Amino acid sequence: MVDAVTAEARLRRKSQLTLPDPIVQAANVGEGDRFVVEVAPDEPDTITLRKVRPSYAGALGAVYGDTDEYLQLERATWGR
């Protein structure tokens, strides 16, 4: 089993947070990646950071076939 990667970060001016290099490398994140940040009311000292996947388009290609064609057909039904 691989140990979790931990590192300390500091919140800077204008609410900017820089992720330490060990975290960036372990999470395979980079400039421009987007995140969802969550604080649960019952755990105010725990902040959860989740990476937003850029796109799932084409992930189910085997199910729907050609994604572009499927989306065109689906969008054609909107507003009916």
Image (tube, grey):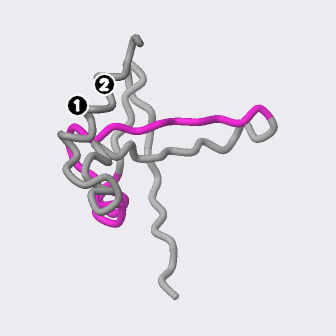
Q: Amino acid at mark 2?
A: Arg
Q: Which percent across, then down, holds residue 33?
A: 27, 41
How far apart in space, not on screen, are marks 2 and 1 (Cα)?
A: 5 Å
Percent x, y of residue 8: 47, 53
Contact check, label 2 and label 1, Cβ < 8 Å: yes
- Residue labelled with disc 2: 75
Which residue is more in the foreground, 12 or 66? 66
Crowding at label 2, few (<14), some or many (≥20) Cα neighbours within 10 Å?
Answer: few
Q: Residues within 10 Å of mark 1 (few under 14, many from 20)?
A: few
What SS does tag 1 mark?
Answer: helix
Residue drawn where x is 60% and y is 42% of the image: 47
Label ID, residue 48: none
Left or right: where 31 falls relative to 19 = left
Residue under the image location 39 percent in, 29 percent down: 12
Q: Is residue 12 magenta?
A: no
Q: Which residue is tagged 1?
A: 72
* Rendered view: 42 above or below 53: above
Where does residue 1 sit, x and y in percent of width and height? 52, 88
Height in image: 60 above or below 77? below
- The part of the image, by quadrant, that contains residue 72 is top left
Compared with 46, 6 (above or below) is: below
Q: Give the image quarter of residue 32.
A: top left
Q: Which residues are magenta?
A: 20-41
**Identity of the amino acid at label 1?**
Gln
Any magenta on residue 21? yes
